[in-house]
Image: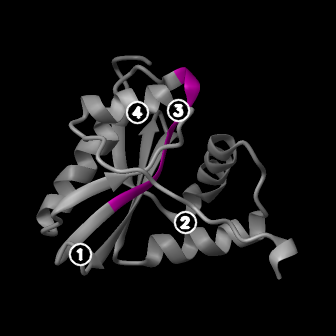
């Protein structure tokens, strides 16, 4: 990146959908239904309990972070969970992930959030190292149960 063009971390907007949709597809190694994803994205960025951030360089969205805040009984306080974070490959190692997380921490602290949680699939070792560098501790295992058509 060129030093004369600073990175801007800002609230993601509806006009950012196409880029973020592409990021999610790349992150999850699939292609989601665009219409359904647009509805979900629009609902999520409109929800006051969600924070969606875009990293922009030279008027190009090069990364994003999605975070949802919940009131959980077992914490008795608001808890934030990073749902997705993605930085384009050619912009990695430039500090964008750190910038996104730093901005998120500022916003969450102002909201009285007790902690931030993040889940990362087992094969993403570099992501695990990133989160540990950012002060996250590995404290849980996540279990999933996926409904299948055969079960219905």
Q: Quadrant of residue 56?
A: top left
- Is residue 48 at least partly visible in the picture? yes
Q: Residue at left 32%, top 55%?
A: 117
Q: Residue at left 56%, top 73%?
A: 42
- Percent position (x, y) of residue 73? 24, 81
Dominant SS type (magenta): strand
Q: Which residues are magenta?
A: 81-90
Q: Quadrant of residue 70?
A: bottom left
Disc 2 marks which residue?
14
- Percent position (x, y) of residue 94? 38, 21
| Circle 1 Cα neighbour tier, 10 Å, few/some/many (<14 / 14–19 / ≥20) | few
Q: Is residue 15 left or right of residue 77?
A: right
Relative to 4, residue 25 above or below: below
Disc 1, SS: loop
| Circle 2 Cα neighbour tier, 10 Å, few/some/many (<14 / 14–19 / ≥20) | few
Q: Is residue 115 left or right of residue 150?
A: left
Disc 1 marks which residue?
74
Q: Residue at left 16%, top 69%?
A: 111
Disc 3 marks which residue?
124
Chain-order first, disc 3 or disc 1: 1
User: CA–CA distance between discs 4 and 3?
Assistant: 6 Å
Chain-order first, disc 1 or disc 4: 1
| Circle 3 Cα neighbour tier, 10 Å, few/some/many (<14 / 14–19 / ≥20) | few
Q: Are marks 1 and 2 in contact (CB under 8 Å)?
A: no
Assess whether residue 91 is covered by the magenta stretch.
no
Q: Are marks 4 and 3 in contact (CB under 8 Å)?
A: yes
Q: Are marks 3 and 2 in contact (CB under 8 Å)?
A: no
Residue 128: mark = 4
Residue in the foreground of this view, choosing between 55 and 138: 138
Quarter of the image containing the C terminus?
A: bottom right
User: CA–CA distance between discs 3 and 1?
Assistant: 28 Å
Q: Are marks 1 and 4 in contact (CB under 8 Å)?
A: no
């Amino acid at each position: 990146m060129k030093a004369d063009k600073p990175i801007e971390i800002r609230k993601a907007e509806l006009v950012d959908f196409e880029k973020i949709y592409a990021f999610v597809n790349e992150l999850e190694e699939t292609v989601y239904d665009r219409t359904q994803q647009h509805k979900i994205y629009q609902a999520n960025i409109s929800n006051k309990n969600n924070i969606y951030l875009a990293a922009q360089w030279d008027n190009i969205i090069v990364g994003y972070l999605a975070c949802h805040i919940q009131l959980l009984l077992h914490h008795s306080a608001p808890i934030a969970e990073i749902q997705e974070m993605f930085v384009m490959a050619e912009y990695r190692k430039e500090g964008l992930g750190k910038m996104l997380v730093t901005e998120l921490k500022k916003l969450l602290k102002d909201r009285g959030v007790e902690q931030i949680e993040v889940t990362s699939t087992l094969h993403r070792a570099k992501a695990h190292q990133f989160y540990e560098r950012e002060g996250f501790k590995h404290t849980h295992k996540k279990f999933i149960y996926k409904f299948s058509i055969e079960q219905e």
